[in-house]
Amino acid sequence: MAMPSSSRPSRDVLHNLATQLRIDSVRSTSAAGSGHPTTCLSAADIVAALFFAEMRFDPADPQHPEADRFVLSKGHAAPILYAAWAAAGAFPRDEVLKLRTIGSDLEGHPTPRLPFVDVATGSLGQGLPAAIGIALNARRIESDYRTYALLGDGECAEGSVWEAAEVAAHERLDNLCAIVDVNGLGQSRATQYEHDTDSFVRRFEAFGWWARSIDGHDMGQILAALDEARNVSGRPALIAARTLKGKGLAAIEGKPGWHGKALKKGEETDKAIAELEAQYVKTTDPPAAIRKPARRRAESAPADFVADMPAPSWALGDKVATREAFGPGLVALGGMDRRIVALDADVKNSTFSEAFEKFYPDRFIQSFIAEQAMVGVAMGLASRGAIPFPSTFACFLERASDFIRMAGISSLGVKLAGSHAGVSIGEDGPSQMALEDLAMARGVPNCTVLYPSDAVSAYRLVAAAAATPGPVYIRLGRPKTPVIYPSGETFPIGGSKTLRETSSDVVTVVAAGVTLFEALAAHDVLAKENVGIRVIDAYSVQPIDGATLVAAGRATGGRIITVEDHYAHGGLGDAVSEAVWDQAFRVKRLAVREIPRSGQPEELLERFGISSRAIVDAVRELLG
Amino acid sequence: MAMPSSSRPSRDVLHNLATQLRIDSVRSTSAAGSGHPTTCLSAADIVAALFFAEMRFDPADPQHPEADRFVLSKGHAAPILYAAWAAAGAFPRDEVLKLRTIGSDLEGHPTPRLPFVDVATGSLGQGLPAAIGIALNARRIESDYRTYALLGDGECAEGSVWEAAEVAAHERLDNLCAIVDVNGLGQSRATQYEHDTDSFVRRFEAFGWWARSIDGHDMGQILAALDEARNVSGRPALIAARTLKGKGLAAIEGKPGWHGKALKKGEETDKAIAELEAQYVKTTDPPAAIRKPARRRAESAPADFVADMPAPSWALGDKVATREAFGPGLVALGGMDRRIVALDADVKNSTFSEAFEKFYPDRFIQSFIAEQAMVGVAMGLASRGAIPFPSTFACFLERASDFIRMAGISSLGVKLAGSHAGVSIGEDGPSQMALEDLAMARGVPNCTVLYPSDAVSAYRLVAAAAATPGPVYIRLGRPKTPVIYPSGETFPIGGSKTLRETSSDVVTVVAAGVTLFEALAAHDVLAKENVGIRVIDAYSVQPIDGATLVAAGRATGGRIITVEDHYAHGGLGDAVSEAVWDQAFRVKRLAVREIPRSGQPEELLERFGISSRAIVDAVRELLG
């Protein structure tokens, strides 16, 4: 719980701290020669109140599990975040002068390279969803810590803010307080609401929040609003704070044209700092004393997910869709470790995450049809030690593409699962077919990308995802496919399975998911003609098993065919091609190369050139 | 303008039409064996009222520029859309029995393969932004047509709906009417608001809309609300209609568990149709007569953008960022053709689209920080003949990734421009660096992807984008680069420029954007050592100039190096690699391979392996 108002520092002390934050925001951005000082100045009183009169935290142990959390959703105000942690004693004040230099972790926008940052911000509209995940984590670990998020007014145009607003209200998150810094100025012009703080109150109230409008430079009003917010029950709280961009510098405050501009080194900066220093007030009040959380509780030992996973019950030859294996995989993990959380966007009966909800309803989060919120909440959860599995149709994960990008920047252990990959979904048509999801996931350089073809590998790879640090993406299919692996088979990350191999193979065919069965069928057709092809299941698309691919390519005359139910760009074909780049092989990519349409799955595999027949033709072309 | 209420058909006639739409929705989905009949049944009365009592359109000429527009945002209700157009006479009623078959354009979700569909839907939350673009187009062509969008209640959880709500209110779009079909049931469970239609009214009102709650099965209330909505001034209108999913089938209506399920062929379907047929009422009222728009006006001849573009004023050697050339390019196009529209997400002073706003403020649309809305509005505009250029930082275009995917499915001429590509932006850090945008754009198979390196090519490629059908993405850089092309140079789509070439070249280096200058610098370093490298500017990344690349590779011993300010996946390297796949070349990709950080641009090019030094090293490695 936050600081009781009785032990708060005086308003004079808080005002002086706000002034110090303003000064350091100007000093650091001027030293860097770039950055956003004016957006820091509007927020200084709010940040001073939060850090020195409201929050419970330990500057020497910012990741303490019981500490209140602060998410700077308006990430371009990074300098004031750094100034606040410096003022709290986390590092020496003059470190802020290294802002934005390559040798410092005080980057232009905050990232978790810094121990006091939970999630990277700077892509606006992501802080509130993450803060909701952080607030939900308090429930998971049964802590009374509170979560605070500071938003810009301009960023409230982002739909993700309203997705988040819905989720927070639905979850009745009264341990969450969002503050909007309504300085009325965007980057290039006034925001659409300028200083109409009531418009924020109306909108958040309509979404089910408690909300209040204040003067964001009146310390008394700030503290009173934080008090009220803390006492709201059953609803999240929103404070819309009217502020001036550049507050404290008379020539700049409230003026357009100052977004993202550092003051010039020398006279301009010196005068500004002198102007701010003159705003210190004399006081003999006791200095601010930060209230620290209690001692850390002992944590339970984490599970060894891969080793402890119970064997699945499917037998070889059973017909089971990989998406059908996802639910049982999640349930098995959930039983092993309370860190496992599942999130859904109203397709739990298609992804089979509903199995997890039945067993662990308290760790199942329904975002409804709001994929950005789902992934953003998962990012917040992951930042606090949970292992979240958000899942939906793979194509709709692309709705959260920018969140996934930022999850990569934060190196967060978000375990994404996308079902209904490719044209093999059939009749629903192109809007429901993910054909660029491998490219999206591979575009996050620290993201592990898994693409199982049968139920056993899908089930085992769900465990591998939980055990692997950082973001993971699991691609799941709609059609039932035969079980081809024994229930005890292991699937190391970065590995592959060579399913067909003779010493006289002339072409290597690399596949994953539904196309693996097309490759196996092509193998049988060609075998009758005494043409041997090596068939490799590339279930780990990133990292990919380069050594096996190189060896197979060498053994088969440098001829490789990749086949994937995905567009030709950024997927399996490109992954294989790059893995063997220095071998001077020929890598022919079979993939979907035009916008597909509705039809039966088999018709579509055939029409878009990824069927067994297409593979047979490609083998002949490479040989001929 | 829509139909005057005096000439409307009687309620009995409309009821019978709604019943026919219900019957055809059941017939078609049962024939297909899949689809979403119950979501059609909830909307039937609303759709009947819109098509036969409200809208002005011509079934024989659905693309008539003066026709009212209907966007089925809840695209999974496609069968009722098809039934309505059949009932209006656009095609024979029994065609609906071909639903979802590979030979029919009546796909599982609507696409513009059908002449009466403007934008593909099926990814929820996209119809309203598109409808706003369509409504804004009425202003552009000075037409009084009205735009109607039918949304599901569940899809209102999508943030894009609220981004759109903001834009529509800001634009005071009183020619737009959105109807939410509040059937209370999502796919897997009840929606969070169930039948609380007032919650929709409250939220839209808070966003500045006129809004009203009705019984969506009471034809009198539907017609009255449409009348009221038509008379609203200065605000968009929202009708929240309480409905029952499966309405008309007693055993199903209002029951969960029926989402996306066709009735079984045979008895189940036959009984349902009999039950619906029994709901026809006897009437001697005159049948519905569709009111058609007036004769088409003559259209002005389109400009020849590429040929007519005035020459830019930059001289060789001038230092100009490619983003700085974007604004003048837009302005030149805007002067040629009124179809050109620019859209911004509050970064017009960084992308330089503000130049267009100064000249053509009536064709400049500010979405504020709402990239999904910006791209969605552009999709709507493009569907009605405009040539929209939405632009923002390239990384934030990824926020609209799923919209861009759907723009591809619709083959819409949305001309996206993304600035601040890559680590070369410097100090702002990774959240502001687009490093996966080429992969995103290339993942749309019909998207042209352009990546100019200097101001002249950027300016010329803006014209090429306007002239090229379908979606286009232009990647723009932040740093100033020297002008290397004469102002009259031409840049055909699918072309490239070979900038350094001798008969003794030993390696081909393919670059674009800022890395082209690193390649030129590497060339000069190696030339001093008598090592010749061929340098190719691959300004057209998709389609890429395969013939030139193959010839260059052959001339340089099969050695190719690609270098891009982008992650290694899905970008220039993969494009080049695939273009030469059958040549058994070695294609070494220099690209960013880890999450970058803040620093100076040159420091970052060096640190992440895409500097001239890295190229020199790679050349030496390839030469062994």
Image (spheres, coloured by chain):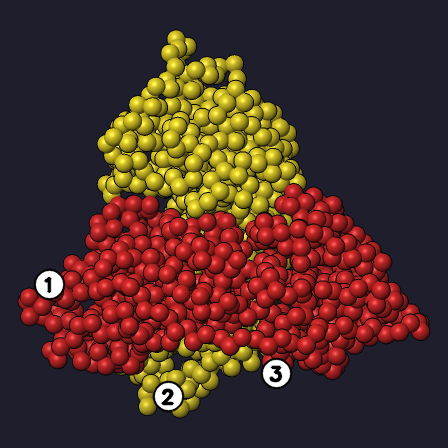
Chain colours: A yellow, B red
For label 2, the residue is A620
Q: Secondary structure at mark 2?
A: helix
What residue sits 27% from the left and 27% below the top?
Answer: A270
Q: Amino acid at mark 2?
A: Arg
The percent coordinates of residue B265 (x first, y second) are 76, 75
Of the residues shown, which amino acid type is indicated by label 3?
Answer: Gly
- Tag 1 secondary structure: helix
Circle nearer the N terminus (3, 1): 3
Going by the numbered disc 1, the residue's amino acid type is Val
Q: Read off the residue under disc 3.
A: B103
Q: Which residue is mark 1?
A: B525
Between disc 3 and disc 1, the foreground one is 1
Please tell me in which quadrant of the rendered image residue B527 appears.
Answer: bottom left
Q: Chain of mark 1?
A: B
Marks 3 and 1, how far apart in space? 59 Å
Query: x%, y% of residue A434?
Result: 51, 66
Q: Position of residue A611 (x, y in %)?
A: 48, 80
In the foreground, A599 or B401: B401
CB-based contact (under 8 Å), mark 3 and mark 1: no
Counting from the top left corner in percent of width and height, residue A136 is at 54, 38
Asked which quadrant contains residue B74, the reply is bottom right
Say which chain tag 3 marks: B
Image quarter (top left, top right, bottom left or bottom right) of the C terminus of chain A: bottom left
Residue at (31, 83) in percent of width and height: A506
Local crowd at mark 2 within 10 Å, few (<14), some, or many (≥20)? few
Mark 1 closeness class: few <14, some 14–19, many ≥20 residues within 10 Å: some
Q: Are marks 2 and 3 on the same chain?
A: no
Q: Callout 2: residue from which chain?
A: A
Location of residue B179 with respect to B586 vertically, above or below = above
Q: CA distance from mark 2 to mark 3?
A: 30 Å
- Please, what secondary structure does the residue beneath circle 3 have? loop
